Amino acid sequence: MIHILVADDDKNTRRFLRAVLEAEAYQVSEAENGEQALEILDREHIDLAVLDIMMPKMDGYEFTKILRNGRNDLPILMVSAKQLAADRKKGFLVGIDDYMTKPVDEEEMLLRIKALLRRAQIVSENRIVIGDIALDYPSLSVTGHGQTQTLPQKEFQLLYKLLSYPGQIFTRIQLMDEIWGMESDTGWETVTVHIGRLRKRFADWPEFEIVSVRGIGYKAVKKV
């Protein structure tokens, strides 16, 4: 599930944005200011932030500057009552990805959010990060817990596919066709063997789990 952070000092605005986003099946966390928003980012995985400019303690500009200075590429949609071109320019200069003025059009906001999420996926499609674990497709490696494991190609592709769509169930045939190819003479039992190897390899890694769905196939479950 996509997790969106809403940072705004107005309670009614946060309540409105939460309702709109949850109606689209997004998970939502709320912050009253930039400091709270940073605290949430430290303990939760966030896919996108929707934030106001004018907030106490730390405003939206400062929040964005801190993230960008730390090389954090979190997609940021700034939603503000400020309508001057100078305000929008300042937002883009500090590193936001998009800007909307209040009152927002719900449908337009959702379309902008989907576009930002799609763009972020394209940029990061060769890498998956789960907590402190990183899967790097070009090197077929998984890094975490002070070690880097380079996996056999099919094992890595299988794990990468499952973790790219956490919670989604894939049948053995689907996985077989996509990773080994429809023309392969290898039986679907090969998927079961590779799943077993992955489970053994990452048995002590609590960040994710590969779950069997009886009579259907497998799914990956993120634990962070």
Image (tube, rainbow, N blue to C red):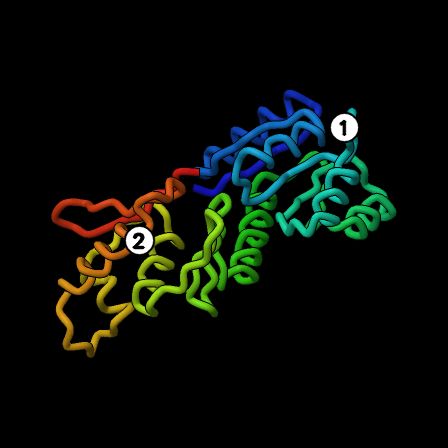
Is 18 on the left-hand or right-hand side of 212? Answer: right
**Residue on which the image places disc 1:** 55
Q: Is residue 5 shown above or below 184?
A: above
Q: Is residue 10 shown above or below 2?
A: above
Which residue is found at the position 23% from the left and 62% from the top?
174
Residue 36 percent coordinates (x, y): 66, 27
**Residue on which the image places disc 2:** 201
Q: Residue furthest top?
A: 11
Disc 2: CA contacts within 10 A as few (<14), some (14-19) or many (>=20): few
Q: Secondary structure at mark 2?
A: helix
Q: Residues under labels 1 and 2: Cα distance? A: 46 Å
- Of the two numbered discs 1 and 2 on the same chain, state the one appearing first in sequence: 1
Give amino acid for label 1: Met
Is 28 on the left-hand or right-hand side of 77? Answer: left
**Closer to the camera in the image, 191 or 21:** 191
Q: Secondary structure at mark 1?
A: loop
